[in-house]
Amino acid sequence: MRARVTLKKGEGRTVKAGGAWIFDNEIAKINGEFNDGDIVDIETFEGNFVGCGFINRNSKIRIRLMSRDRFADEDGVKHGVEIDKDFLKMRVRNAWEYRKKVMEPCDTSAGGSLRLIFGEADYLPGLTVDKFNDVLVVESLALGIDRLKGTILECIKEVLLEDGISIRGIYERSEAKERDLEGMPKVKGFIGPEFDTNVQIVENGIKYIVDVKDGQKTGFFLDQKYNRKAIWKLMRPESSVLDCFTHTGSFGLNAAKAGAGSVLSVDASELAIEQAKENVRLNGLEDKMTCEVWDVFELLPKLEEEGKKFDVVILDPPAFTKSRASIKKAVTGYKEINLRGMRLVKDGGFLISASCSHFMDPELFADTIRKASRDAHVRLRQVEFRTQAPDHPIAWSSDESYYLKFYIFQVVTEK
């Protein structure tokens, strides 16, 4: 018999509204024995059944909900469903079928690349699984899901095989600090047979080598897939492009492939720039694209001082804040790069600006750009606003699943 968690009076409003988390200060009592990582049933103070999820006393997120389905025993008491392989395979199949409906066919093909599992938004809290060609990269950030990880990966391989897609290997990148908060050691390495961890993928017709072992996060940022394609329409043979925080060159490569005359892609990471250069060679774009190691905060004022101007400036920085405590500092950083970037855009040219920080909410990000434009003495004409690709679905009951903001602006110099 599962342990049963009773919430405090008046608590549980978020989870009852569709959220997936119950925090430590929302719990009144727990009846029954359990170990951290076990599935428990949850009820309100009044005794109404909420659902079932896995518990961990090491974490402030005490319970992560797995299901709201229920059944009644012979005494009429409601319990959560069994979280077994059949249940997990249902979750995986639903995630895959969703992606087949909303992604381009090439992305869900055998050689395609996409995010297969996106944590709470796919009702598998704490788990991320990316598919790069025929390789899976998994990140597990919660104790309960970590215990189910092996079964879930087995289900993924089975579901994909039903569509004729076989998986060559799996690599784990469970290295984030969230595991510390869950009382778990960080884990990195092969799950199953070893393989070459430099994996070639194709996105928007562009070839990339993805380093699933040592690249950032899971090796490549799939969430900007369709945003990268959105910049193609801006490129002309005479277009000059400055691509900042390029990582492995993805936005710059899209600009060059789309017909830009010259692209300068910069990043502070020497490893990232070496990978970007390799991707440039792989696509035969050496005559159009240059990759250099630069701290963007140092480069932008230098270019401004030199009087340089570009037809398109792209700003796709890493998250400047990963907590509410550092938002003020992050706002300063976002305003600085956007102000400097605007000043480097030719009159009538374009600024592309993104933020991948969940804590930099859409209103705050827009307000920061607005203030930067005033200080830069330019006017902005919004061309497009976009967010993350649909293989990173936004669950309206889970604020954390909405994190990427992406703008395309035309910059008009005030006269």
Image: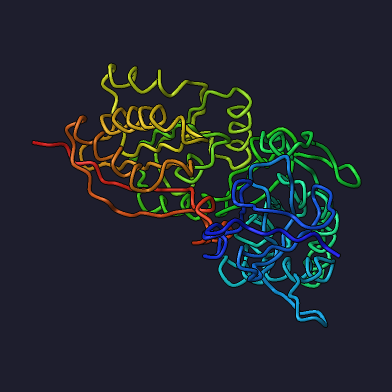
Which residue is found at the position 48% from the left and 21% from the top? 294
Q: Residue at x 67, y 59 (%)?
A: 6
Q: Give whichever of 77, 175 is nearer the camera.
A: 77
Residue 261 is situated, as x and y percent measured from the top left of the image, at: 39, 39
Say if 247 sits above or below 80 in the image: above
Location of the C terminus by quadrant is top left
Q: Position of residue 45 (x, y in %)?
A: 61, 63
* Residue 133 seen in this snapshot: yes
Q: Where is the N terminus found, in terms of image quarters?
A: bottom right
Residue drawn at 64 percent across, 67 percent down: 50
How far from the left and from the top, in percent, is residue 155? 82, 64
Left/right placement of residue 388 relative to residue 155 reads left
Q: Which corner quadrant of the image does residue 242 belong to?
A: top left
Instruction: Specify how the rendered protein is coloured.
Output: rainbow
Q: Is residue 139 visible?
A: no
**How many numbered marks, from 0 up?**
0
Question: Which residue shows up at 43% across the image and 34% down it?
Answer: 243
Quarter of image, res 160: bottom right
Q: Say left or right for 379 vs 397.
A: left
Which residue is situated farthest in the left direction here?
415
**Image location of residue 107, percent across then percent down:** 63, 61
Left or right side of 382 for 93 = right
